[in-house]
């Protein structure tokens, strides 16, 4: 099936081809016996007049053809832009809380440890892995990340948002005088395909959480893709 633009284009090309054939025929008529005028008269009189009229028609059709080509190019551009909006834009977003069930402290551990946010609220694109707590980018782009932390009841909580193992932002509470504190932090990060982002609990630190109020959460999403 051809589109309306393609049908117009094909029709114009066929008309142009026919007119070129008529011009060639008219020119060849110059070699015909002057007494044989029936065919010439059918096309409006003398060969010269016929050639002139056909040339003008060809010029008009070529102008229309140029306009059709411009419209076709604009249509193709609009289709490409529409596809980028409806199909070409990658969708990446996730949000998760630390505990699926129960409550209590997470930590302390002997080494710095990625926190595993196991209660997944959403995970469009499946870039976040609740088994490891690590987000791995599959699309190059600018991303937004945010996490929240509830301190342990004895004030010994230190966490950081990490990109490829490097600290980006942190939440810190080591005061034992106020045991019911919360904090959060966020960042907008450029990521290449394969880059990782996670929340790290530092060695010998701990945080408190439960599965009802979801004090500790980790969220991220793609703002926009970048060219490869």
Image (spheres, rainbow, N blue to C red):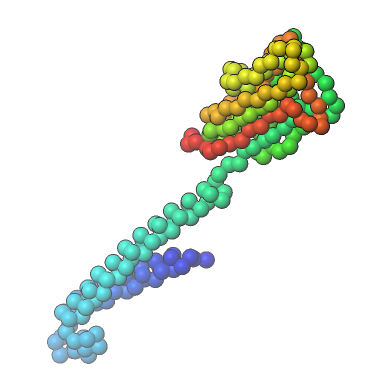
Q: Find residue 200 and report its horizontal and vertical position in percent.
A: 67, 19
Vertical position of residue 17 compared to residue 112: above or below: below
Q: Find residue 152 and report its horizontal and vertical position in percent.
A: 76, 17
Q: Quick check: can you spot residue 205?
A: no
- Residue 22 found in image quarter: bottom left
Please give the name of the residue rendered at 72% of the width and 32% of the height, measured from the top-left corner: 96
Please give the name of the residue rendered at 53% of the width and 34% of the height, measured from the top-left corner: 141
Q: Is residue 67 left or right of residue 200?
A: left
Q: Find residue 72 and report its horizontal and vertical position in percent.
A: 40, 60
Q: Find residue 77 and report its horizontal and vertical position in percent.
A: 43, 53
- The residue lying furthest to the right in this view is 102
Q: Is residue 78 left or right of residue 28?
A: right
Please give the name of the residue rendered at 28% of the width and 66% of the height, measured from the top-left corner: 63
Vertical position of residue 226 compared to residue 206: above or below: below
Q: Quick check: can you spot residue 218?
A: yes
- The residue lying furthest to the front in this view is 177
Q: Nearer the viewer, residue 28 or 118?
A: 118
Q: How many marks?
A: 0
- Residue 136 found in image quarter: top right
Q: Nearer the viewer, residue 198 or 175?
A: 175
Q: Nearer the viewer, residue 148 or 226?
A: 148
- Residue 171 found in image quarter: top right
Please give the name of the residue rendered at 71% of the width and 23% of the height, measured from the top-left corner: 182
Vertical position of residue 132 compared to residue 27: above or below: above
């Amino acid at each position: 099936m051809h589109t309306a633009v393609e049908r117009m284009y094909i029709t114009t090309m066929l008309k142009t081809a026919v007119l070129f054939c008529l011009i060639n025929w008219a020119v060849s008529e110059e070699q015909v016996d002057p007494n044989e005028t029936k065919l010439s008269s059918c096309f409006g009189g003398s060969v010269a007049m016929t050639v002139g009229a056909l040339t003008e028609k060809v010029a008009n059709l070529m102008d229309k053809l140029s306009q059709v080509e411009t419209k076709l190019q604009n249509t193709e551009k609009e289709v490409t832009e529409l596809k980028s909006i409806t199909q070409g834009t990658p969708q990446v977003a996730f949000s998760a809380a630390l505990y699926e069930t129960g409550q209590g402290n997470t930590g302390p551990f002997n080494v710095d440890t990625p926190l595993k946010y196991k209660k997944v609220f959403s995970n469009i694109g499946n870039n976040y892995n609740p088994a490891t707590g690590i987000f791995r980018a599959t699309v190059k782009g600018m991303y937004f990340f945010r996490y929240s932390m509830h301190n342990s009841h004895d004030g010994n909580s230190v966490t950081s948002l990490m990109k490829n193992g490097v600290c980006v932002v942190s939440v810190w509470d080591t005061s034992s005088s106020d045991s019911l504190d919360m904090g959060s932090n966020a960042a907008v990060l450029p990521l290449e395909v394969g880059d990782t982002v996670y929340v790290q609990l530092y060695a010998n630190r701990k945080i408190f959480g439960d599965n009802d109020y979801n004090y500790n959460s980790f969220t991220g999403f793609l703002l926009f893709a970048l060219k490869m």
